[in-house]
Image (cartoon, rainbow, N blue to C red):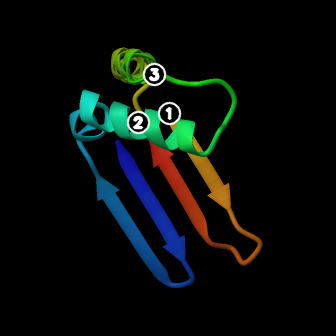
Amino acid sequence: MRVRIRHGKLRIGIRLPAGWLLNRFTAGIAARAMNESRVGEVVTAEQVSEFFRRVKSVREEFRGLTIVEAVSASGDRVHITL
């Protein structure tokens, strides 16, 4: 997984192994954060973990797929790709 950030002249590129981000520990943290912010229905760690498993299986087929692409009004950019 690759995270790229542009802020003015500053450019940051970080490569992270998907296993570091998409695991049971982070699934629990993500579920807790979603439930605390009251976004939709209650989400369990098992549901998030299942989502992470599916993302891992898909990333081999769709390597380079952009997951998040955000651009602010001032021109700052964030890209997250598989």
Per the image, the residue denoted by label 1 is 65
Sequence-wise first label, 2 or 3:
3
- Left or right: residue 31 versus residue 40 is left
Local packing at callout 3 (Cα closer than 10 Å; few below 14, some 14-19, many 20+) is some
Packing grade of label 2 (10 A; few <14, some 14-19, many >=20) is: many
1 vs 33, left or right, is left
Compared to residue 27, the image places residue 14 above or below, namely below
Above or below, 33 against 4 in this view is above
Point out residue 29 in the picture as x, y percentages from the top left corner.
37, 40
Residue 38: assigned label: none
Task: Return the disc, 3 or 1, that comes first in the chain's sequence.
Answer: 3
Picture coordinates of residue 76, whole percent (x, y): 62, 72
In front here: 49 or 70?
49
* Quadrant hosting residue 60: top left
Residue 22 vertical placement versus 69 (above, below): above
- Figure quadrant of the N terminus: top left
For label 3, the residue is 44
Amino acid bearing label 3: Thr
**Picture coordinates of residue 50, whole percent (x, y):** 39, 15
Closer to us: mark 3 or mark 1?
A: 3
Circle 1 SS class: loop
Nearest the camera: 69 or 63? Answer: 69
Front-lying residue, 11 or 33: 33
Three-letter amino acid code of the residue under disc 2: Leu
Residue located at (77% from left, 72% from top): 73
Circle number at residue 82: 2
Residue drawn 43% across the image and 24% down it: 48
Q: Secondary structure at mark 2?
A: loop
- Label 2, label 1: how far apart the Cα atoms are: 5 Å
C-beta proximity under 8 Å, tags 2 and 1: yes
Q: Amino acid at mark 1?
A: Leu
Residue drawn 65% across the image and 24% down it: 41
